[in-house]
Image: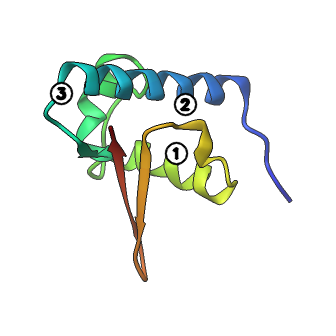
Amino acid sequence: MPTTFSEKKIHRIGRIDQVVRDYFEKNVSVKEVMAKDLMVLFIQKGIFLSDYNNGLPIRKLLRELDKENKMNLLKHIKVIRKDINRNWYFKK
């Protein structure tokens, strides 16, 4: 049974996309960055309140997007699937 994302969550996803876009504009030499490495930036921008378990808040949101087949809501996302877990990246 598919779940729908709340307006608040869709707004948060849009803000994440905007922060990632701005990050790549300011850091032109960076081609790819692990999603968890941008947690400090997401916290500074008020998207997440705090970081715990090495980027768990962004990883949980990305897993939820993946499960609901909504990865297209983020333009810069890249996922590498392994047997047990997934590695999340933002790419230029």
> Residue reaching furthest right?
1
Name the residue at 63% across, 30% down: 9
Q: How many marks?
A: 3
Name the residue that disc number 2 marks.
Answer: 13
x%, y% of residue 83? 43, 83
Q: Is residue 83 above or below residue 27?
A: below
Q: Which mark is residue 28?
A: 3
Q: Which residue is mark 1?
A: 61
**Amino acid under label 3?**
Val
**Left or right for 31, reference 64:** left
Q: Are marks 1 and 2 in contact (CB under 8 Å)?
A: yes
Secondary structure, mark 3, is: loop
- Dot in front, 2 or 3: 3
Instruction: Label 2: state its secondary structure.
Output: helix
Q: Earlier in the sequence, mark 1 or mark 2?
A: 2
Q: Foreground: 56 or 80?
A: 80
Residue at image coords 29%, 35%: 39
Graded by Cα atoms within 10 Å as few (under 14), some (14 to 19) or many (20 or more), the crowding at tag 1 reads some
Q: What's the amino acid at mark 1?
A: Leu
Earlier sequence position, callout 2 versus callout 3: 2
Element carrying mark 1: helix
Residue 78 lies, in percent from the top left, at 42, 53
